Image (cartoon, grey):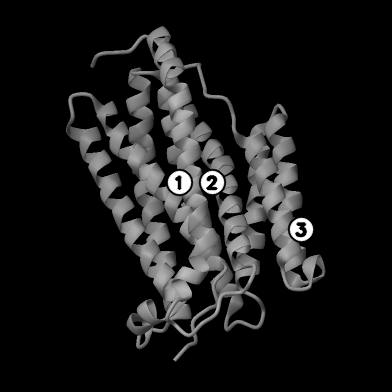
Amino acid sequence: MALIRPTEATDSARRTGPGRAVALLVLVGLGALIPLLGPSVAAHGTGESAAADSGAVALLRAVLFAALCVQVGELFVSGLVRRLPAAQSGRPGSWAPYAAVVGFAAAAAAGELAPHGHGSRGGVLALLEAIAFAVAGLCALSPRPDRQAWPLAAVVLAEALRAHPPTEHTPLIGSGLTVVHLTCSALWAGGLLTVLRTLRQWGGAEAGSALLGLYARVAAVLFAGVTATGLCSSLRRMPSPTVLDQLTTTAYGRVLLAKVLLVGAVALLALWARTRLRRAPDPLAACFPARVEIATLGVVVAVSGLLTALPLPIKG
């Protein structure tokens, strides 16, 4: 395997930095349109009406999920790196403190938009999420950044409780499914982002392909967890006799169908990357499909935020 010297990798990063930054800003801007415009588009022709603030709520949820993914992903990959005997010493700069600030702002704003504001159950849970993000940010700046795991777990739990109010049938089962689904999703998407950032820092070092392979093995389990919990949650809200009809006739069903198709595309990209990782002369050739995979996962996060702002379909 041809190795890239650190100086060459750094020079390459400097040359492509501005272009990558502009491309990233464009992608983020386009991604923000999904939750902002999604409610009215998804509800068109269904007889349903989107709430006036549903676009803003969807965008805030998507931002909150993205911040959670960044922080959880860094913790996850830090653990993977410690398992590599020949890991490189250089690590990319942490985005966790910035993600904590973004998550704090998104959670606090979402609480303001909740019915009856922060005095409602949803508002209180949003406030707890904001506090947990603030604590996670302080932990990220401390000598023990791994302590972020506890406040981030509180964010996941609060989000699961918010998604399943006590008026719902068997809310604890729904919250449990959401905890597993959200945790696996954050580890999958955030872990891949951090792995790609680490590989770019390490250049073509052999430890890079080892890290990518280690992540790929864990990601297969995470994908299974996301798929199983997503299927169970969907069937709880859209029972099997009506699910096919509601996937096309309700706003929630349409967005859910779009998410399923996107996750299927991500699975194919992941399979492509894993195949390259096993068979290509240079295992780091898997980075290209992995980059496309992380971009698609970003769209999945935006669609997930949109899904939380839509009215649930009527069971029938």
Q: Secondary structure at mark 1?
A: helix
The residue tagged 2 is: 69
Left or right relative to 205: residue 65: right
What whole-number distance in Å separates the C-alpha atoms at marks 2 and 1? 6 Å
SS category of the residue bearing label 3: helix
Q: Amino acid at mark 2?
A: Cys
Position in image of residue 271 (x %, y %): 25, 46
- Kind of residue at badge 3: Leu
**Residue 121's quadrant in the figure?**
bottom right
Question: Is there CB contact under 8 Å for labels 2 and 1?
Answer: yes
Q: Which mark is residue 272?
A: none
* Residue drawn at the location 42% of the way across and 39% of the way down: 192
Q: Is residue 31 above or below residue 96?
A: below
Front position in the image: 47 or 63:
47
Residue 9 rendering spot, x and y as whole percentages: 39, 14
* Residue at the image position 42 percent from the left and 69 percent from the top: 256
- SS class, disc 2: helix
Q: Quadrant of the C terminus?
A: bottom left
Residue 285 image offset from top left, x and y in percent = 25, 29
Query: What residue sits right under mark 3 in the picture?
Result: 127
Residue annotated with mark 1: 189
In this view, the residue in front, 100 or 63, is: 63
The amino acid type of the residue labelled 1 equals Ala
Q: Residues within 10 Å of mark 1 (few under 14, many from 20)?
A: many
Cα separation, mark 2 vs mark 3, equals 19 Å
Assign the N terminus to one quadrant of the image: top left
Q: Is residue 184 in view?
A: no
Q: Nearer the viewer, residue 76 or 61?
A: 61
